[in-house]
Amino acid sequence: MVAPVQDCLAALQPLVAQWVPDMGPALRQLAQWCGAQGTALGPVFAQRLQSGRVRECHGDLHLANLVLMDGQPQLFDAIEFNPALRWIDCVADIAFLAMDLEARGRADLAWRFLNAWLEHTGDYAGLQVLQYYRVYRALVRARVAGLRLAQVEGEGEGEGEGEGEGVGDKRAASLREVRRYLALALRFTEPRTVELWLAHGFSGAGKSTQSQALIAERGVVRVRADVERKRLFGLAPQASSAAVRGGIYTAEASQRTHEALAQAARCALDAGYTVLVDATFLNPAMRQRFMALAAQAQVRCRILSFEAPLAVLRERVRSRQLAGGDASEASVQVLESQWAAAQPISPAEEALTVHVDTTRPVDWNVLLPRAHGSMPATSPVARA
């Protein structure tokens, strides 16, 4: 995927020089970043090709090629004329839509989409190339806007006085798009603060529901134990496990689930993303395992303890079971067992813990203020 990126950068150089010369330094910085990333990610690209992650995709999956029909998203205008632009890493397609959502000020929707896709596919290893492809897709849109600008200028030639008002509006819009996408591409290359968050709490405490806003607003990768456990048995997140002989909640299954969670979390951390591991984390040994993982990755670990009274937990679990369609299959009996066997967070862990009362609206900006350089920032180049 290096050649298309370099081709896009080369095409942008004369466009930027002519129309937005003040963005020249940004384009040079992007070219340098893409060159370093293309080299560093070479083995990853090869591995993903061998593992079947390069497929026949849409190829041009930005918002202008999506429409809602009867409440369902419909894709259209896929690239058919050039197989090289259509046979790509699946992450390159996903990155296009995620990038365009961010360009339009909806980073929250971008991260809801990315996390939903990761849960569906389990391709957490693909996070290694996500940032590279997001930069590339922003460059593609900047290039398209630049070409449109050149066309607009051509349309304006020879027009009489007072006839170019429409052309002027088009010119201004195209210039804004060039700047917007180049600025976004540059922002994608900036180092990010990386942390490991553990969602601790009983079944029904609101770990998944209350963390949804957090991961969307902060650009966090979430890995859910309920989802990964079912993936191990070939089940969809909402599927019932009743037909699985021996069940999926054995000690062996739990051990395998923890290993899958750790592997997915490490993939995300190494790719330079903060990770929220959504599990009960009621077992101190499991918490210690992930705290050790954070230490190995040289990132801060936080415990987000989601809390509610037992009566509230019981009602939530009952309601969830009646509604169906949730990855969790925990029953009231499971909850009662958890409560009876609960072990308190240790004093050492308490120093890392943020207590979240889920019986009232959660304000994450108060509970978990955004970091401002207090932790090591991770460069995607360094992590590649």
Image (tube, rainbow, N blue to C red):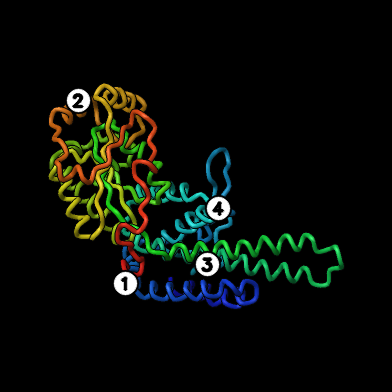
Which residue does the numbered mark 2 point to in the structure image? Answer: 333
Q: Mark 1 or mark 2: name the one nearer the start of the chain.
A: 1
Instruction: Identify which residue is drawn at 64% across, 69% down.
Output: 147
Q: Which mark is residue 104?
A: 4
**How would you rate the neighbour count of disc 2 (Cα within 10 Å): few for under 14, some for 14-19, many for 20 or more?**
few
Real-space CA distance between mark 1 and mark 4, rounded to the nearest whole angstrom: 33 Å
Q: Position of residue 42 (x, y in %)?
A: 35, 73
Which residue does the numbered mark 3 point to in the structure image? Answer: 139
Instruction: Identify which residue is drawn at 24% across, 46% down.
Output: 232
Real-space CA distance between mark 2 and mark 4, rounded to the nearest whole angstrom: 46 Å
Real-space CA distance between mark 3 and mark 4, rounded to the nearest whole angstrom: 15 Å
**How would you rate the neighbour count of disc 3 (Cα within 10 Å): few for under 14, some for 14-19, many for 20 or more?**
many
Instruction: Identify which residue is drawn at 23% across, 38% down.
Output: 280
Which residue does the numbered mark 1 point to in the structure image? Answer: 43
- Marks 2/4 in contact by CB < 8 Å: the verdict is no
Q: Is residue 77 above or below residue 212?
A: below
Q: Position of residue 26 (x, y in %)?
A: 51, 71
In this orientation, which residue lies closer to the viewer: 192 or 45? 192
